[in-house]
């Protein structure tokens, strides 16, 4: 047992039950891959531990003049294969454990899709829904100022995540550039197209999620037309995934957000739902559906379930109730290790987060490549390259899973961890 909390390589029921926090769950997945790849204890420990973690106090001046101090984080898990890369989350429950876990997932995601990045993540423990736009701007700029020494287009490149968007990225770009004394578009991705953002970035994660679902259905000989899907989380990832799958012929029978869900056996129209969400701020009172709870959505009788909200949505407590044969992880870490084992025993297929939602980081990489070369690709070019990259990764995972008789998460993790381990071995240990 290492000092860094590295899980021993045995994976019994006790280890599974203990692995329910986000970082413990991420380390559990790593331990499984490390065992399969025969990694040395030292390399395993190195990969189980973030390379850099910065915790900052962010004072934010509220609109009434009061000052409140909130905690922020930026964690760089690994940058052996290239600059650290990962989103920034604004959510009241953000903590160092969760940010560290998500930074680790980013390392695997970059490695799995074979883009030259490491993994990072940031977060601020604030609720953007109760924070006004001017407060959010002040908060973002002050947070960036506190983590500034870590950032840079060749060091660490943030992107949007839960609670942040294009506007947040524009403020980050501006704050970084003002400090640098010149404009640095490559310091963030997911920014507005007017500032060097890429065509096609907004829907990239969702396209990857939808394509993974469609490629799997195709392999199973299930026609998309008439197949059913339920989606938890109707935000940047879930809403567009609903649209793409609806356009491909699937029936989107249930979607939800933090307030609850809406269900219609005949199928919901995602475009009408989006219009409703813009007006009402929630989906559970959509006139074209019946209200359902998030718990009922996860248990819906559907072909495909897409958790696209927060981590830890499918747990040992509710995994038994999941009826879907295919779970496509739009969110990061939505399935706990114990839930994963239950789903596997039931014969359900899980397309893991580091594959299913990698479309976002892939197009972020394309955005950064365009920025570094002062180029601008068309949306068609971006989508063509995205599909090639995602399809290659999907095939590699499916092939390895078939060859080794393991599930897709094990296969994806083994491919990713092997690539990062190879980079470490080639670079050697300094000094
Ligand atoms: P978002 O903030 O745009 O949307 C999140 C959605 O989840 C909202 O509909 C929200 O109401 C809902 N939600 C929040 N808490 C919930 C709860 N307890 N129960 C049910 N629904 C809840 O965020 P997003 O960018 O769509 O990200 C969603 C997930 O996808 C996160 O796990 C994120 O890390 C992951 N992800 C996002 C991207 C990206 O490009 N945005 C890329 C990869 C992974």
Image: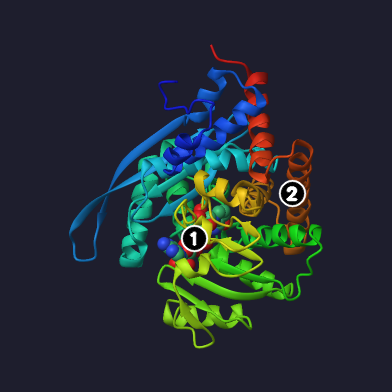
The one nearer the camera, 107 or 195, is 107
Compared with 328, 29 (above or below) is above
Which mark, by number, is residue 309?
A: 1
Tag 2 secondary structure: helix
Crowding around mark 1 (Cα neighbors within 10 Å: few <14, some 14 to 19, many 20+) is many
Query: Could you tell whether 41 is left or right of 291 in the image?
Result: right
**Mark 1 CB lies closer than 8 A to ligand 1:** yes
Instruction: Report if residue 115 is visible in the image.
Output: no
Locate residue 136 relative to residue 109 in the image: left or right.
left
Q: Position of residue 296 (x, y in %)?
A: 48, 70
The residue carrying mark 2 is 394
Residue found 65% across the figure and 19% down from its top: 425
Marks 1 and 2, Cα distance to the nearest angstrom?
A: 22 Å
Residue at position x 62%, y 48% in the image: 344
Between 355 and 63, the one nearer to me in the picture: 355
* Position of residue 277 in the picture relative to residue 90 (left or right): right
Residue drawn at the location 68% of the way across and 20% of the way down: 426
Label 1: which secondary element: loop
| Visible residue check, residue 203 | yes
């Amino acid at each position: 047992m290492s000092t860094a909390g590295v899980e021993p390589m045995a994976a019994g029921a006790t280890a599974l039950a203990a692995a329910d926090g986000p970082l413990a769950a991420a380390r559990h997945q790593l331990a499984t891959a490390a065992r399969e790849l025969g990694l040395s204890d030292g390399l395993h420990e190195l990969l189980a531990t973030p390379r850099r973690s910065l915790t900052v106090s962010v004072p934010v001046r509220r609109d009434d003049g009061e000052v409140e101090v909130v905690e922020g984080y930026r964690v760089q898990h690994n940058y052996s294969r290239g600059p650290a890369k990962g989103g920034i989350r604004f959510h009241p429950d953000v903590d160092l454990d969760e940010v560290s876990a998500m930074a680790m997932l980013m390392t695997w995601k970059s490695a799995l899709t074979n883009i030259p990045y490491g993994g990072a993540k940031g977060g601020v423990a604030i609720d953007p829904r109760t924070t006004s736009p001017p407060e959010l701007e002040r908060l973002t700029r002050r947070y960036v100022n506190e983590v500034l020494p870590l950032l840079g287009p060749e060091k660490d490149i943030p992107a949007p995540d839960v609670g942040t968007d294009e506007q947040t990225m524009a403020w980050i770009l501006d704050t970084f550039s003002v400090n640098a004394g010149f404009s640095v578009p490559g310091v963030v991705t997911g920014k507005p197209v007017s500032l060097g953002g890429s065509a096609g970035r907004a829907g990239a994660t969702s396209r990857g999620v939808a394509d993974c679902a469609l490629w799997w259905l195709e392999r199973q000989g299930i026609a998309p037309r008439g197949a059913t899907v339920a989606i938890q989380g109707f935000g940047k990832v879930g809403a567009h995934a609903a649209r793409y799958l609806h356009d491909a012929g699937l029936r989107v029978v249930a979607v939800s957000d933090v307030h609850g869900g809406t269900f219609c056996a005949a199928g919901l129209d995602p475009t009408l739902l989006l219009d409703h969400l813009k007006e009402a701020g929630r989906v559970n009172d959509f006139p074209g559906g019946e209200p359902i709870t998030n718990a009922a959505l996860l248990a819906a009788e559907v072909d495909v379930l897409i958790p696209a909200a927060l981590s830890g949505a499918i747990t040992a407590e509710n995994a038994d109730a999941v009826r879907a044969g295919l779970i496509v992880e739009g969110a990061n870490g939505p399935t706990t290790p114990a839930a994963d084992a239950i789903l596997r025993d039931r014969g359900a297929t899980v397309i893991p987060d580091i594959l299913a939602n990698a479309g976002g980081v892939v197009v972020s990489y394309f955005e950064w490549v365009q920025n570094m070369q002062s180029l601008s690709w068309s949306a068609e070019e971006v989508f063509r390259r995205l599909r090639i990259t995602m399809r290659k990764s999907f095939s590699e995972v499916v092939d390895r899973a078939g060859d080794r008789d393991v599930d897709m998460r094990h296969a994806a993790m083994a491919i990713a961890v092997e690539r990062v381990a190879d980079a470490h071995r080639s670079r050697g240990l300094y000094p």
